[in-house]
Amino acid sequence: MAQDRTTPVIQPRGYPKLAKFMVEQDYAMLRQFRQLAMRNLLYLQAEICELEHDLTEQGLLDANASDERKWYDREWWYLHQGEARGTGGKQWKLVLRVRAKLREYYAAVQQYQSIDSIQKPSHRQRKQLQKYINSESLGGLCGFLGKDLGEHDQIAPVYDAKHLGDLLFLREDPFEDDFLSHLLTGPILRLFHQIWKYFKRPLPHDTEAAAGHVEEDTALWHYSDRHVRLAANFVGSGVSSLLPMLSIIALFYVQDTLARLGLVCAFTVVFSLCMFAATQCKRVEVFAATAA
């Protein structure tokens, strides 16, 4: 049977729509579940402690045995071949269980540390993603039903404000987390948008348009991170170039010794503040740069 072409095609919502938005608009944001990860580490730690106790007890029993088990603590070959030689082998089985559990434990610790070091989203980014999920005007309205992203009593969705500290931002090219970048992506970008929005088209709805239907725009504007990063690099490079030149010019025209010393101190403070605002330098690097 031929399908009526005038019937609008309903596109999948939920996870496919959200995944497309995250990839295309660079909003790949996920929960870390740090409490669950830490809880799992505590369980693994408890299992290892129990195995450690069992291995110690079994070692004492074998050390006081009258057969070749008494050599287990001094000869690895007898310990390894205990089951094959018919002397038990319980201690070696416990060693293998400890080895496997330690491997799992260290892998979980390493994974927790690596995840915890990934870039965190800002409150504005989290709020924007949450608004997209529930807003039709932004092109979202994904209609989630589950406990992860749906609306349920007593259960906060993944992108609720209470989970802000537990979210991570997956980006191929992480944006620098300094004061200048936050200033450009926050107040300055919002001020720029108030002017530029009249010359820029918002994102269209992610739907399959019916025949003869003009696709409507959403209330969502997108600005490339590459352009914002370029602006941040331009401002940072300009400040780093102008500040030394201004200090030299100022010291050239000021002849008074005390005034020159005051200018040196003032420019040093301004230089350190600019390093803090425009870069991600550590305190020891700021001290080294100002001392030089």
Image (spheres, rainbow, N blue to C red):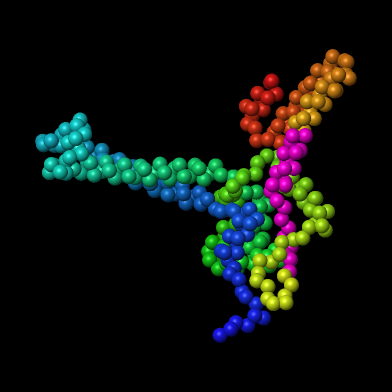
Magenta region: which residues?
216-238
What kind of secondary structure does the magenta stretch mostly adopt? Answer: helix
Q: Position of residue 118 (x, y in %)?
A: 56, 44
Residue placed most toward the observer, 83 or 196: 196
Q: Measuring 74% from the left and 34% from the top, which residue is drawn there?
A: 237
Residue placed most toward the observer, 252 or 108: 252
Give the quadrant of residue 95.
top left
Q: Position of residue 126 (x, y in %)?
A: 64, 54
- Rendered position, 22 above or below 6: above
Looking at the image, which residue sits at the far left?
A: 66
Q: Position of residue 16 (x, y in %)?
A: 57, 64
Q: Measuring 63% from the left and 57% from the top, which residue is drawn there?
A: 24
Quarter in which the C terminus is drawn: top right
Give the quadrant of residue 81.
top left
Question: Can the viewer see residue 205 in this picture?
Answer: yes
Question: Can the viewer see residue 161 in this picture?
Answer: no
Residue 202 forms part of the magenta stretch: no
Residue 227 forms part of the magenta stretch: yes
Quarter in which the N terminus is drawn: bottom right
Give the quadrant of residue 145.
bottom right
10 lies left or right of 270: left
